Image (cartoon, rainbow, N blue to C red):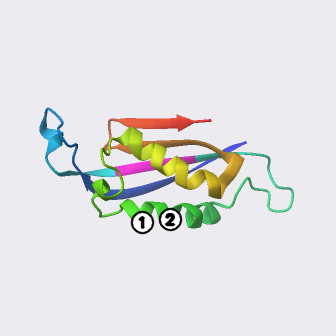
Amino acid sequence: MRVTREFKFDAAHYLPNYPGKCAMMHGHTYKMEVTLEGNINQDTHMVMDFHELGDKVKPTVEKFDHHLINEYLSYPTVELMVEYVWNELYPILGEKLQSIRMWEGPLSYAEKTR
């Protein structure tokens, strides 16, 4: 069984030495989907409680929300942001972590899956 929770945040970034407009600081509204896969717990009848999942992901989202992403990544593409988040969440969520999909605006996303 797979379950997904969505998170949203606003952040700014710039791509150093990029040959275009993205070299200038600008912002996006990001949407991130965290998907878990596992068996349904017979006591809770859930793979993981969505509230619990939110509590586990919230510290990572708060790092980015209304911040300059370049403080965490020297070249903050959405692909590298997904890698960063994966590396933060995998030790917390373990083998249940199936995928992270991050939307940079409404039209484009990067995704990492197991």
Callout count: 2
88 is higher (above) or lower (below) than 78: below
Give whichever of 54, 90 is nearer the camera: 90
User: In this figure, which residue is indicated by the disc labeled 1?
Assistant: 62
Tell me if residue 31 is in the magenta stretch. Answer: yes
Badge 2 element: helix
Q: Kindly indicate the quadrant of the structure image that contains residue 80.
A: top left
Q: Kindly indicate the quadrant of the structure image that contains residue 45.
A: bottom right
- Chain part drawn in magenta: 30-34
Q: Residues within 10 Å of mark 2 (few under 14, many from 20)?
A: few
> From the viewer's perspective, is 18 left or right of 56?
left
Badge 1 element: helix
Residue at point 42%, 66% (across, down): 62
Amino acid carrying mark 2 in the image? Lys
User: In this figure, which residue is indicated by the disc labeled 2?
Assistant: 58
Tell me if residue 70 is in the magenta stretch. Answer: no
Kindly check if marks 2 and 1 are in contact, taking CB atoms under 8 A apart as contact. Answer: yes
Residue at point 46%, 49% (across, down): 84
Query: x, y percentage for residue 39?
Result: 79, 46
Residue at point 68%, 51% (across, down): 94
Quarter holding the C terminus is top right
Query: x, y percentage for residue 103?
Result: 38, 43
